[in-house]
Image: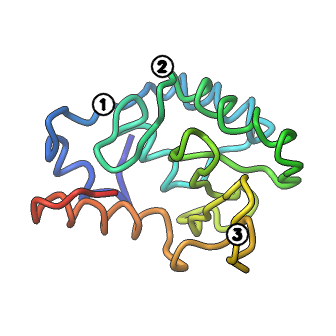
Amino acid sequence: MEIELLQNLKDNPNLSLFENKGISLQEITLLESVYNNGNPFPTALREMLFLAGEFCAVFDFGLEETQQEMQEAARSPMPKYNREILRPFYVVDVYNAGSQFLFVYLDENQFDPIIYEAVLHERHNDSTPWIHALLDRTLSQFIDSRLERLKRGENPF
């Protein structure tokens, strides 16, 4: 697969204790069929999965073994919190015991989509919407910023 947007991720596969590890194009196609009605994912998402879909130093995939398990784990608590996302989306990072995650909408920019945060639990004294753009950064910009933190010896999260 030709890498157009995530050259920095490709060029820095081992900035943490573990090396980034991707998933196959066949696995990506399967995920596209399940989460995007068979349509291709945005370029930046496809590249991230290809380069680091099994392990990524700048994203936390949770305790799940596969991307599909992570997708289901992030989606499953939504009814408990009375939350629903009606548009097609793909989770790229989970945290806070699964009640928060980062994701991209699959029906926006098909090249490099904006990254969003979803906070399923109630936030007291906080008027931030439960879904909000995360610093209006695209997926590739977000990955690059976390890679730069790693290069400086900082925690990427």
- CA separation in Å, label 3 and label 2: 33 Å
Q: Nearer the viewer's eye, disc 2 or disc 1?
A: 2
Residue at 89% from the left image edge and 49% from the top image edge: 82
Task: Tell me if label 3 and label 1 are in contact, CB under 8 Å.
Answer: no
Which amino acid, mark 1? Lys
Q: Residues within 10 Å of mark 3 (few under 14, many from 20)?
A: few
- CA separation in Å, label 2 and label 1: 13 Å
Which amino acid, mark 2? Glu
Q: How many marks?
A: 3
- With 106 as the anchor, is 53 left or right in this view? left
Q: Nearer the viewer's eye, disc 3 or disc 1?
A: 3
- With 15 as the anchor, is 136 left or right in this view? right
Q: Nearer the viewer, residue 99 or 152?
A: 99
Which amino acid, mark 3? His
The mark nearer the N terminus, 3 or 1, is: 1
Mark 3 — residue? 124
Quadrant of the image occupied by residue 52: top left
Q: Residues within 10 Å of mark 2 (few under 14, many from 20)?
A: few
Mark 1 — residue? 21
